[in-house]
Amino acid sequence: MSGIYPAAARVFRPWKNGGGETAEILCWPEGAGFDDFTLRLSTARVDRSGPFSLFPGVDRVLTVIEGGAMVLTFDGTDHPLAPGSALAFAGDAPCTARLDGSPLLDFNVMTRRPLQAQVTVGPLTADARFAMLLAPAAGLARLDLVDLDLAETDLVAHLIGTPVIAIHLPRA
């Protein structure tokens, strides 16, 4: 099936700052690195507190999808993130993460300005561009990512209403 990025195929690699692991799901343009992507979707394993990597010119939306909660601190202000909650922030803002319990898995949406993404957690609606499944559906596994513009029409119809992390991007 085209437009499907299976969770089982993800390979974890060290973070940009070396303090954890990330599995890139999609990067555009294809072959771009940390310093020249326009869109990057990834998951990260976080097992300890520490600083986030800086991404100048990039906006981020982080959603905790498994495990414990964490608190992100920007300029002395705490932003708690429980599983299922998302937080948008500038990738060039210094940030420290503090775990409030067990290790966790998060989902990162990163866009280089001026591209902007909106992320919602809940039932899938037809206006999303990508969907990370929060429950198995239509023969797909939990945490599979679907590019709704490339997936088969019947599959997309079956996924409407499924619990997801939806990524909304402007369409050309």
Image (tube, rainbow, N blue to C red):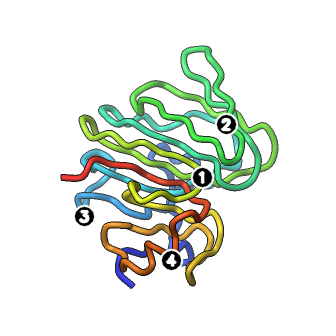
Percent position of residue 82, x then y? 71, 41
Give the residue drawn at x 53%, y 36%.
Answer: 52
- Left/right placement of residue 43 relative to residue 49 reads left
Between disc 2 and disc 1, the foreground one is 1
- Vertical placement of residue 92 versus 154, above or below: above
Q: Nearer the viewer, residue 172 or 110?
A: 172
| N-terminal-most mark, 4 or 2 | 4
Mark 4–mark 3 Cα distance, whole angstroms, equals 17 Å
Say whether disc 3 or disc 1 marks the residue closer to the N-terminus. Answer: 3
Cβ atoms at labels 2 and 3 below 8 Å apart: no
Query: What residue is disc 4 on?
Result: 9
Disc 2 marks a residue whose amino acid type is Leu
Give how far apart the Cα atoms at labels 4 and 1 are.
24 Å
Check the image and name the residue furthest to the right: 101
How many angstroms separate mark 2 from mark 3 (CA)? 31 Å
Three-letter residue code for mark 4? Ala
Kindly report the distance in space between the C-alpha atoms of the residues bearing marks 2 and 1: 16 Å
Question: Crowdedness of circle 4 by 10 Å Cα count: few (<14), some, many (20+)?
Answer: few
What residue do we see at 61% from left, 14% from top? 76
**Which residue is drawn at the image coordinates 48% and 25% (left, top)?**
94
Image coords of residue 153 (percent x, y): 36, 77
Q: Which mark is residue 30?
A: 3
Quadrant of res 93:
top left
